[in-house]
Amino acid sequence: MNRRSLMTLVAMGLAAPSLSRAQESWPDRPIRLIVPWPPGGSTDTIARLFQPKLAEILGKPVIIENRGGASGSIGAIEAARAAPDGYTWMFAYDNEATNQTLMRLPYKTLEAFTPVSLVATGPLALVAHSSTPYRNFQDVVAAAKAAPDTISFASSGVGGLAHVSTTLLQQQGRFNLVHVPYRGGGPAVQDAVAGQVPLFMSNVVIISQHIRAGVLRPLGVTTLRESRHVPGTLPFAEQGFDGFDAPTWWTFLARSGTPEPIQRRMHEALTKALAEPDVRSRIEEQGCDVRATGPEECSRFLANEIERWGKVIRDNNIRADS
């Protein structure tokens, strides 16, 4: 054995106890949770509902950092560049799957991150402002066919499932709408409620109160079957779009390379926080279903979503500027 190899082994031996102590003492300082969307959107809302309990269980502050912009990619890039020391995590929205195909990103999701848990899933709903003449989805289709490219629909940003699934509906139904992307669900819902855009495809989390108030009228949901979160609203699968199924989702991700003991402890803490009746009920009251899966199921789900929607994007020539 040469001198360099011997020194390397000695260094590794000296570093191992230090690394072990760091893992055992984790967390010993505040934890960053990057939410790659502005305040007021669904991802921010759900994160802030489980954040206090998660911090209580871990015994250290969990600080939410909103890093919105570019359909969630700005915050995701920052998270992907973070040190894998267990002090930076990301709470991602469904764009994390579609962005892999739509954008030129400096990372690949399943290489840069390790899935911790699929936190929640839920329906997307197409809603119309109450001042519009659209009483059902067929009214929208008929109007769009009569006057193509004159009716606008808003979404939380380019490339999310709200955008991609609506594009798929248009292509399957042979009608054309004009996409108006926003920098997050918060700004989009403000304009939708104000009647600045006639249609809005969104998760139910940020529009449920406006549906209940009668300001926004639901025309269809993207789940295969009727959702308890939008009662009385037919799924698109029952409105002439057989088999249409595109639920939205939120997932908790670790930086790849984060020590497994730390990942396990975070998963245990997150699962415990989401199991708290008050936390669970408050999240589900927003319009989604808590899943709180294990890492393996979350990993399979995310890989499938990346492949599934990547194929839809390529097959239908959906572009980041569409």
Image (spheres, grey):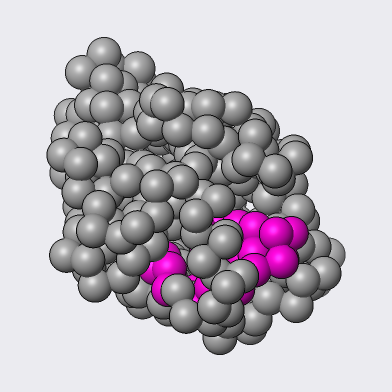
Q: Nearer the viewer, residue 92 or 211?
A: 211
Q: Nearer the viewer, residue 232 or 55?
A: 232
How many marks the image carries: the answer is 0
Q: Which residues are magenta?
A: 152-178
Is residue 73 shown left or right of residue 56?
right
How far across and down, in percent of the image, does residue 181 sit? 41, 75
Q: Nearer the viewer, residue 63 or 301?
A: 301
Can the viewer see residue 266? yes
Which residue sits at x=56%, y=86%? Answer: 321
How far across and down, in percent of the image, does residue 304 sit? 74, 47
Which residue sits at x=48%, y=27%? Answer: 227
Which residue sits at x=39%, y=68%? Answer: 154
Q: Is residue 261 above or below residue 302?
A: above
Which residue sits at x=46%, y=46%? Answer: 136
Magenta stretch: includes residue 260: no
Classify the position of the N terminus by image quarter: bottom right
Classify the position of the C terminus by image quarter: bottom right
